[in-house]
């Protein structure tokens, strides 16, 4: 069968690549065409566009690139129609992907499967109408989404397990590199333990979050080396430019690219933006502070308390359904607050052991299912059943 996949960022590229590999094991005649990244390309198939050409975040960047976004959307729709796959698999990235799903429903007979659900439980809950109308099957990777969709909105979904949990467990099972070897490989001295900095995968996130992360963690630079996890799609020069404007950053921050799991494995604590990285950090047993700068912080805080329908922004707290990690966003995002919370998580700090213990609860809630294998098996079976019913 022919599978067309669409992702919009680095984490989607990773999850989609694993899904493609599982699809190949379940369908030996699988063909792929996609908007994706290097990891998907390595699995095989034809890449139409790299996700770097799609990923715009925030009102102003989106506004400035509207013509490019619409051009990419039009290209995607035409390419799908021309290739006519058996299914289009949408991976997160709802602003783009829900538009594609609507097009598929209105203009074609091609079904849309959604892998990694849009986070409508956090905001834009009204999108459930579009999902119910346009998405043939939805495959969830977060356990709390099942009651949200099925009990609250009466929309049946498939919980397939969490791919991040599987990816981290696979890494831990295979990893054997010691601290000294890691430092040598990345050309760093091994004289200090690490504080890991994970400021996001998009340029706007990095520009917003990294300066405060560096300023806060620099207070502990006499005891810890600050190590920045670089996103695979972002050039080193972009990070260097930000660090040039951040005081002593260039002399105290080391850069590590395409090796985030290994960095976290060796880290003592971490400063992390919201998103999949918070869950990865928890599953790698690293105490963390979640930091996320927003525009008009007081207004965002008001909206979070009165408009948004979720209590947390980090996956760790959402899965645990309680406060496990500190979430410093909007009006709570300050250098002093970040530094204070970080101190609580360093060895001897008052919050370190409690957080590590709470991580075990998060792991238990995620379960041990292999998400891409489960999703691929379900997808192939559903498509074959459909083909048998409607030859």
Image (cartoon, rainbow, N blue to C red):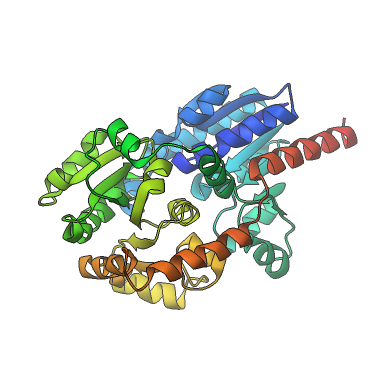
Quadrant of the rendering where the N terminus is positioned: top right
Q: Nearer the viewer, residue 94 or 102?
A: 94
* Residue sitting at x 72%, y 46%: 136
- Counting from the top left corner in percent of width and height, residue 217 is at 22, 58
Q: Position of residue 60 (x, y in %)?
A: 31, 51
Tell me which corner region of the image, top left, top right, bottom left or bottom right, holds residue 295.
bottom left
User: Does residue 86 appear left or right of residue 298 in this picture?
Assistant: right
The part of the image, by quadrant, that contains residue 46 is top right
Q: Is residue 188 above or below residue 253?
A: above
Give the residue displayed 59% in from the left and 35% down from the top.
Answer: 18
Residue 358 higher or lower than 242, as above or below: below
- State whether residue 218 appears in this view: yes
Say how many tags the image has.
0
Q: Quadrant of the C terminus?
A: top right
In the depicted view, which residue is nearer to us: 193 or 378? 193
Q: Nearer the viewer, residue 258 or 245?
A: 258
Q: Could you say where residue 184 lies in the image, as x and y percent from the top left?
A: 28, 33
Left or right, 175 with respect to 86, comes to left
């Amino acid at each position: 069968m022919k599978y067309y996949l669409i992702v919009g960022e680095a984490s989607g590229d990773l999850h989609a690549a694993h899904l493609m590999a599982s699809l190949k094991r379940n369908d030996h005649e699988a063909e792929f065409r996609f908007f994706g990244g290097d990891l998907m390309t390595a699995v095989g198939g034809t890449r139409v566009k790299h996700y770097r050409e799609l990923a715009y975040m925030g009102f102003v960047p989106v506004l400035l690139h509207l013509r490019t976004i619409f051009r990419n959307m039009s290209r995607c729709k035409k390419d799908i129609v021309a290739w006519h796959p058996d299914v289009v698999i949408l991976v997160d990235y709802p602003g783009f992907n829900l538009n594609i799903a609507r097009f598929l429903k209105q203009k074609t007979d091609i079904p849309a499967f959604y892998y990694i659900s849009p986070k409508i439980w956090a905001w834009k809950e009204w999108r459930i109408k579009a999902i119910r109308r346009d998405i043939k099957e939805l495959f969830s990777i977060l356990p709390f989404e099942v009651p949200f969709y099925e009990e609250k909105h009466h929309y049946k979904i498939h919980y397939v397990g969490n791919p991040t949990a599987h990816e981290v467990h696979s890494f831990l099972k295979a990893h054997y590199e010691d601290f000294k070897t890691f430092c040598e490989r990345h050309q760093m001295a091994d004289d200090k333990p690490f504080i890991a900095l994970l400021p996001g995968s998009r340029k706007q996130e990095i520009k917003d979050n990294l300066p405060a992360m560096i300023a806060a963690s620099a207070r502990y630079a006499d005891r810890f080396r600050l190590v920045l996890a670089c996103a695979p799609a972002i050039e080193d020069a972009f990070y260097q430019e930000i660090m040039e404007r951040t005081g002593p950053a260039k002399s105290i921050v080391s850069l590590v690219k395409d090796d985030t799991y290994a960095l976290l494995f060796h880290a003592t604590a971490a400063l992390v933006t919201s998103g999949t990285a918070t869950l990865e950090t928890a599953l790698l047993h690293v105490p963390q502070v979640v930091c996320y700068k927003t525009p008009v912080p007081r207004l965002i805080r008001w909206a979070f308390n009165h408009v948004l329908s979720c209590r947390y922004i980090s996956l760790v707290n959402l899965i645990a359904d309680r406060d496990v990690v500190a979430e410093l966003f909007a009006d709570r995002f300050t250098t002093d607050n970040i530094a204070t919370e970080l101190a609580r998580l360093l060895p001897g700090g008052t919050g370190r052991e409690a957080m590590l213990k709470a991580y075990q609860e998060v792991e238990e809630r995620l379960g041990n299912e292999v998400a891409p294998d489960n999703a691929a098996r379900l997808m192939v079976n559903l498509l074959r059943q459909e083909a048998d019913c409607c030859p």
